[in-house]
Image: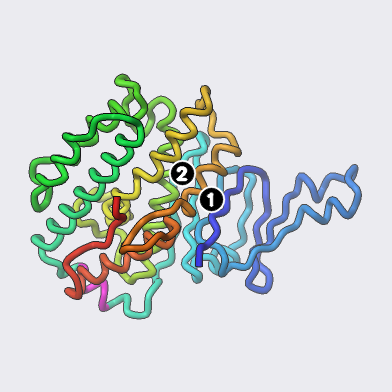
């Protein structure tokens, strides 16, 4: 079942009632000039079980402690945004699987060769995805396909970095484009979309019973989601594809408008070919997360990634 990704860009009061998220929009409810029946439309309810991600992107959004607890109990990822409307915080449950303690131990005890092989698979899949996007943009990708075949265990030659440098110089047909967190548009759209996928992946990893903090490659001591950042890498090209489409249609992307955010929030429904079947991206990341857990437990040696 696809869970809903919900974004709040306006003032709202979020509370809990009968396992439902109650959304009250004060600008409508408190407008005495509106007919009463229209004011009543300022209150909406959504079953908690239908929600996968909540994005809070307004300073006047209030969420009750009871609702926050209910969201976390149902493995809902809650994202908070800064003044620039970019995600800066991610809330996840401490426990998401009945076998969590056992699986934590398996993950902690994982050997370095296993983690390096898992990172090799991750880099190969990511470069393959970037190569596919370049093909769609009419850009030569023979070097990318060659690099896919040359990635060693642990990517000791840093082919991921070489591929990224070529990819970003060409994907927008703008050789001056620099991919940077604080860079010029469409970096803001990329940041927003990646944050959604990161939340989906972290949520899926928690549900699979592994720690999203302990990465196979990323090891930033200040990053609570190193593993999520590792495993989401092959899914970044799906965000890129959405951003490219927007970039071609809209000249000015300096502001993340509500309409643009809605387009980016829909990335969870993008179709992905994985494990010989087509699935929405949100379901695909669950397949990938479960395969990561099986690698840590010794049941498998291969992460199931999208088939580009």
* Alpha carbons under labels 1 and 2: distance apart: 8 Å
Q: Are marks 1 and 2 in contact (CB under 8 Å)?
A: yes
Residue 298: % across, % down? 17, 74
**From the viewer's perspective, is residue 22 above or below residue 159?**
below
Residue at image point 13% right, 58% down: 117
Left or right of 151 in this view: 163: right
Judging by the rendered image, the residue that carries numbered circle 2 is 87
Residue 239: % across, % down? 41, 43
Q: Say which of 69 and 230 sits in front.
A: 230
Left or right of 204 in this view: 46: right
**From the viewer's perspective, is residue 169 above or below residue 159?**
above
Residue at image point 77% right, 53% down: 42
Q: Residues within 10 Å of mark 1 (few under 14, many from 20)?
A: many
Region in magenta:
102-107
Residue 24: % across, % down? 72, 55
Which tag, 1 or 2, sits closer to the chain's start? 1
Residue 223 seen from this side: no
Judging by the rendered image, the residue that carries numbered circle 1 is 55
Q: Would you say residue 237 sits in the magenta stretch?
A: no
Residue 234: % across, % down? 29, 49
Q: Say which of 14 and 156 sits in front.
A: 156
Label 1 SS: strand
Residue 274 seen from this side: yes
Left or right of 29 in this view: 58: left
């Amino acid at each position: 079942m696809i869970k809903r990704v919900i974004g709040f860009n306006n003032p709202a009061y979020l509370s809990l009632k009968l396992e439902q998220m109650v959304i009250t929009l004060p600008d409508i409810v408190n407008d005495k000039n509106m007919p009463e029946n229209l004011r009543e439309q300022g209150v909406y309810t959504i079953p908690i079980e239908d929600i996968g991600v909540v994005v809070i992107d307004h300073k006047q959004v209030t969420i009750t402690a009871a609702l926050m607890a209910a969201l976390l109990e149902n493995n809902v990822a809650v994202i908070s945004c800064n003044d620039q409307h970019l995600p800066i915080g991610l809330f996840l449950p401490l426990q998401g699987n009945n076998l969590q303690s056992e699986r934590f131990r398996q993950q902690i005890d994982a050997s370095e060769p296993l983690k390096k092989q898992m990172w090799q698979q991750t880099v190969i899949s990511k470069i393959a995805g970037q190569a596919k996007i370049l093909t769609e943009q009419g850009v030569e990708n023979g070097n990318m396909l060659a690099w896919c075949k040359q990635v060693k265990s642990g990517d000791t030659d840093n082919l991921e970095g070489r591929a990224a440098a070529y990819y970003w110089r060409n994907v927008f047909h703008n050789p001056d484009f620099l991919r940077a967190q604080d860079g010029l548009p469409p970096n803001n759209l990329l940041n927003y979309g990646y944050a959604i996928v990161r939340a989906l992946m972290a949520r899926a990893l928690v549900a699979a019973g592994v720690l999203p903090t302990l990465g196979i490659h990323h090891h930033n001591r200040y990053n609570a989601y190193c593993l999520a950042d590792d495993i989401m890498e092959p899914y970044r090209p799906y965000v890129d594809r959405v951003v490219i489409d927007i970039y071609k249609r809209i000249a000015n992307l300096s502001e993340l408008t509500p309409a643009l955010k809605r387009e980016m929030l829909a990335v969870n429904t993008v179709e992905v070919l994985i494990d010989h079947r087509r699935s929405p991206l949100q379901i695909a990341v669950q397949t990938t997360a479960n395969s990561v857990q099986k690698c840590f437990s010794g049941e498998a040696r291969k992460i199931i990634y999208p088939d580009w």
